[in-house]
Image (cartoon, grey):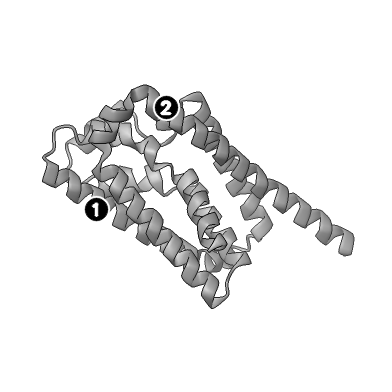
Amino acid sequence: MELFIYLFAALFSVLNPIGTVPIFVGLTQHDSMRERSRISLWTAIDVFLILIISFFVGQYVLDFFGISIDALRIAGGLIIVNSGFALLSGRFSKTRGINKKVEHEVQNRNDIALTPLAIPMLAGPGSISLLIAFYQEHHAVNDMVIGSLAIFAVAVVIFIILRSAHYLAKILGTAGIVAISRIVGFIVIAIGIQYIVSAVVSIIRSNLMS
């Protein structure tokens, strides 16, 4: 249970679906309730598929390119820390690839679930590297089942949040969403720094033992 809570909390913090609410509202403001529900569902499904594939296949990709897990932790930690600082400074939407040109393009498309909602707004390099590092440390059958359940739970929460995005935007308001995003941003920074520290400690220990 502790492993489930740890991975769920880490993924939720890095993905930050609350911070996606204003963007989702802006991109779907002219859509019907049924269309918003469909987009929310497919966004959650796409995020689940991206994360589950990264979880089970990511390690083999690293092996193919000869990338060590410590290098991944440092790179992923830097990305996660950058996302956290972006949340704290209010620059998060800009770092997720959403600008006026992209917004105009997606509003003229029928389906925005995969791009830009699932990628890059939710499932990005930070969450993918987090999952690969988690798999490296917890690859027993029970751990993989727990990891898969945590990914599924995050996808369900993403669906619920996006499905309720327009209500949340009215209830929380811009100030409320910003406040939550900045709290999450602080947690995200801590997660990223922890990954970097763990990698550096592992490298130092390996050098001392060799």
The residue under label 1 is which amino acid type?
Answer: Leu
Q: Residues within 10 Å of mark 1 (few under 14, many from 20)?
A: many
Q: Residue at x 44, y 66 (%)?
A: 148
Choose between 53 and 22: the one closer to the eye. 22
What secondary structure is marked by label 2? helix
Quarter occupied by residue 110? top left
Instruction: Give the image location of residue 155, x and y in percent.
Output: 36, 55
Q: CA distance from mark 2 to mark 1?
A: 24 Å
Q: Can the viewer see residue 114? A: no
The quadrant of the image that shows the C terminus is bottom right
Q: Residue at x 36, y 59 (%)?
A: 48
Does residue 133 lie above or below 11 as drawn? Answer: below
Callout 2 touching callout 1 (CB < 8 Å)? no
Q: Residues within 10 Å of mark 2 (few under 14, many from 20)?
A: some
The residue under label 2 is which amino acid type?
Answer: Val
Compare marks 2 and 1 and give the one earlier in the sequence: 1
Residue farthest toward the bottom in the current orientation of the protein: 141
Q: Which mark is residue 175?
A: none
Q: Which residue is mark 1?
A: 41
Q: Which mark is residue 178?
A: 2
Does residue 136 lie above or below 175 as drawn? Answer: below
Residue farthest toward the top in the current orientation of the protein: 175
Instruction: Give the image location of residue 67, x and y in percent.
Output: 63, 60
Instruction: Give the image location of residue 8, x and y in percent.
Output: 48, 54
What secondary structure is marked by label 1? helix
The mark tally for this picture is: 2
